[in-house]
Image: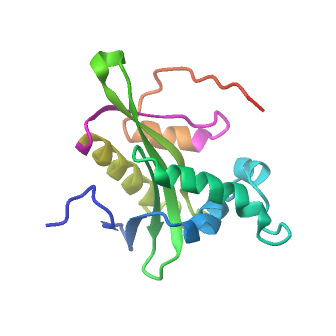
Amino acid sequence: MDEPTKLPHRLALRDDVVTLERARVADVPSVVALLRDDAIGAGREAPADAAGDEHLAPYREAFAAVDADPNQLLVVARDPDGEVVGTLQLTLLHGLSRGGATRLQVEAVRVASARRGSGLGRALITWAAAFGRARGAVLAQLTTDLRREDARRFYEDLGWVHSHAGLKLDLR
């Protein structure tokens, strides 16, 4: 029987089926393209038309670090043609607070613009919560840029609660 949090895993959507897989280094260009596929990401991520392949070098280095860490998982969602149409990064955070609880950090959730509204985002987040539960996480957390009002509504519709204020410090 297919364990729902093992990869690869098939997700049945309204009009399609996608397969969740652990990302491979060959997926890095597709993941970067998804990260750029909105107004905020387009200004933050390396341009796809940068000269040569060098603009992907820092992404490949980051991928290697994520992939080597047993507490992190970068997931891609592939359509039946093998195209990457979604991604998210999961990190298990072990800590002393909450009685030594493990938390699931959900990051960089992206769905290809042509696939938004298909149920893929909902399926990804639901799968991520099940993944965390199966690994002992008692709390899932994420941040979303305050400019992403639609994303915030999306998460709240799925039961996520806006319970904390997040702060960031640029260390560059």
Q: Please tell me whether residue 171 belongs to the stretch shown in magenta.
A: no
Along the horizontal axis of the image, is 119 left or right of 166?
left
The picture places residue 105, in percent across and down from the top left corner, at 45, 37
Q: Residue at x 48, y 52 (%)?
A: 68
Along the horizontal axis of the image, is 34 left or right of 126?
right
Q: Is residue 68 above or below residue 7?
A: above
In front here: 148 or 144? Answer: 144
The picture places residue 158, in percent across and down from the top left corner, at 38, 41
Please say which color scheme the image uses: rainbow
Along the horizontal axis of the image, is 15 left or right of 88?
left
Q: Is residue 54 above or below residue 99?
A: below
Q: Residue at x 61, y 68 (%)?
A: 30
Quadrant of the rendered image containing residue 17: bottom left
Taking the view exactly as shown, the residue that stands out farthest to the right is 51
Q: Assign the C terminus to one quadrant of the image.
A: top right
Along the horizontal axis of the image, is 44 left or right of 133?
right
In front here: 79 or 137? Answer: 137
Q: Can residue 35 be spotted in the picture?
A: no
Q: Can residue 94 be spotted in the picture?
A: yes
The picture places residue 9, in percent across and down from the top left corner, at 31, 65
Q: Assign the N terminus to one quadrant of the image.
A: bottom left
The picture places residue 13, in percent across and down from the top left corner, at 36, 66
Q: Is residue 41 above or below residue 84?
A: above
Q: Is residue 168 above or below residue 12?
A: above
- Count up the numbered dots: 0
Q: Residue at x 56, y 66 (%)?
A: 25
Taking the view exactly as shown, the residue that stands out farthest to the bottom is 81
The residue segment tinted magenta is: 134-150
